[in-house]
Image (cartoon, rainbow, N blue to C red):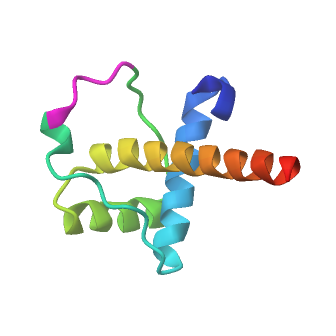
Amino acid sequence: MREMIGPDLQAAARTALTHYFLKLKLGRPPIPVPKGLGQAVEKPVVSFDLTIDEATRELLSAEAERQETTLSDLAGHSIIVYLAELDLMKTALSSHKTT
């Protein structure tokens, strides 16, 4: 994971949340948080507080409520979505170079 996002996990998490936020603002909501995510996974390996601006926090909190999940689970999910999209772009670019 660090090879995709670099050594600063907080910056990567902030970028992922911003990416998720922008998708919501543009009316292109990402894949929703899987139901029961909070009960299905073990305790996080890494945990930290993240400061985000109020507009982002309000939109993401409303989205978490709409999806009947916690802001923490939505944040974790946004990181997974972001990493998946980075991987998809990397794969598309490398396959484009070989054609």
77 w.r.t. 39: above or below: below
**Picture layout, residue 35 above or below residue 11:** below
Residue that appears at 43% across and 64% down = 30
Q: Residue at x 29, y 50 (%)?
A: 71
Question: Is residue 88 rendered to the left or right of residue 84?
Answer: right
Residue 85 percent coordinates (x, y): 57, 52
Marks counted in the figure total 0
Q: Magenta span: helix, strand or loop, mainly? A: loop
Percent x, y of residue 16: 54, 49
The magenta stretch spans residue 5: no
Q: Quadrant of residue 18?
A: bottom right
Image coords of residue 96 (percent x, y) = 81, 54
Rendered residue at 20%/43% (across/down): 37
Q: Residue at x 22, y 69 (%)?
A: 66
Depth check: give the residue in front, 98 or 92.
Answer: 98
Residue placed farthest to the top in the image?
45
- The answer to whether 43 is drawn above or below residue 32 in the figure is above
Corner quadrant of residue 41: top left
Taking 93 as reference, is 62 left or right?
Answer: left
- Closer to the camera, 93 or 76? 93
Direction front: furthest residue = 99
Residue range (magenta): 40-45
- Residue 72, given in percent of the width and then of the height, sits at 30, 43
2 relative to 21 in the view: left or right: right
Looking at the image, residue 11 lies above or below residue 60: above
Residue 43 located left or right of residue 78: left
Query: Quarter holding the N terminus?
Result: top right
